[in-house]
Image (tube, helix red, strand yellow):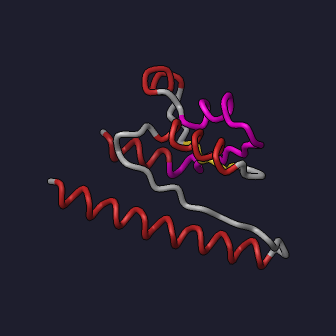
Amino acid sequence: MEQLTNDMREIAVENGKRFIQACSKKASSLGISDVELKLLVTNQASPAKHAISDFVNSENPDMLICGSRGMGFLNRAFLGSVSDFLAHNAKCPLMIVRTPAKIVEADRRCEE
């Protein structure tokens, strides 16, 4: 099980790196230069919202961009929302990007 977790983590990090590279290329193609994008990788024991908040406090970025999966009121109330936490606690401008509805719906079908 531990090996599976490590393999999944490696795949997630590689996907994250490819995403950062694609975002950097897109920014360049739009004439946006001098952009530094970072991929934050944490251990599983640290809740994501606290790891991101600590990173923002130590790195002092110009802006933080965070995704939102659109979990809905009840899930957000019980599980908490990283984007909601960051909206109230980040010490820099925050942009929350919503997941397209068709992806959210597909995720919900997979969970059933």
The image quadrant where one finds the C terminus is top left
- Image-based side of 78 in relation to 59, left or right: left
Which residue of the protein is positioned furthest toward the right in this rendering? 31
Residue, x 48% and y 41% (percent of image)? 48
- Image-based side of 53 in relation to 33, left or right: left
- Image-based side of 66 in relation to 45, left or right: right
Q: Is residue 90 magenta?
A: yes
Percent x, y for residue 75? 45, 26
Residue, x 36% and y 67% (percent of image)? 11
Which residue of the protein is positioned furthest toward the front in this rendering? 58
Q: Quadrant of residue 91?
A: top right
**Residue 62 versus residue 57 in the image, above or below:** below
Q: Which residues are magenta?
A: 82-103
Percent x, y for residue 6? 26, 60
**Residue 30 versus residue 104 in the image, above or below:** below
- Image-based side of 35 in relation to 16, left or right: right
Label total for image: 0
Residue, x 46% and y 56% (percent of image)? 41
Percent x, y for residue 45? 35, 40
Residue, x 54% and y 36% (percent of image)? 82
54 and 105: which is toward the camera? 54
**Residue 93 versus residue 37 in the image, above or below:** above
Q: Is residue 89 magenta?
A: yes
109 and 73: which is toward the camera? 73
Q: Quadrant of residue 23?
A: bottom right
**Residue 63 versus residue 87 in the image, above or below:** below
